[in-house]
Image (cartoon, helix red, strand yellow):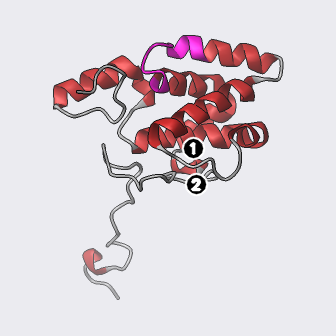
Amino acid sequence: MYPNKAEAPYAKSAPPPPTSAPPFAKPREGQWSTGLCDCFEDPSNCLITCCCPCVTVGRIVEIVDRGTTSCLIGGLISYAMGSVGCGWLYACTYRSKLRGLFSLPEAPCADWLVHCCCCACSLCQEYRELQYRGLDPSIGWEANVEKWNREGLTPPIVAPGMAR
């Protein structure tokens, strides 16, 4: 039926969809780039967050605090608070800080409620938001700054005192 394999319908395939947004993509102002339940857009982060949320919290903390709190310290604080059932409380403060940095709405409900009821989903959403806005939480703040300097890019988060 198909003498040439190139003509077979399965031989032609569409290019794979992008797995992440291009660096420094212009997200819609004042809106989250992904939904709360879009965890599987980044399966590796979803798995890490479900198995060990303190790692994801630590990465988010380091980026949002612009390197003043290390990933290790943020993760240990999250672990310590989580061991007494209050890890979501620590994480929700960073959701509020992240929203403040990018003028994001408190959606779909209050930060504390999102983290209390669906902590893994909210952490994944925050991690994706940082990625979508041109940051790589997995390499830390200093490595992101070095990358921006090397590539001549303007950071999406300007530390206090860095603006002209």
Q: Tell me which segment is drawn in magenta.
A: 63-74
State yes or no: discs 1 and 2 in contact (Cβ < 8 Å). Answer: yes
Q: Mark 2: which amino acid?
A: Gly
Q: Residue at x 22, y 27 (%)?
A: 164
Give me the C-alpha separation between circle 1 and circle 2: 7 Å
Q: Residue at x 25, y 26 (%)?
A: 147
Q: Residue at x 44, y 29 (%)?
A: 137
Q: Mark 1: which amino acid?
A: Gln
Which residue is labeled 2 in the image?
35
State left or right for residue 49 relative to residue 41.
right
Is 44 situated above or below 39?
Answer: above
Residue 5 falls within the magenta-colored stretch: no
The N terminus appears in which quarter of the rendering?
bottom left
Which residue is labeled 1 in the image?
125
For residue 67, the mark is none
Horizontal and vertical percent position of residue 66:
42, 21
Residue closest to the far right: 84
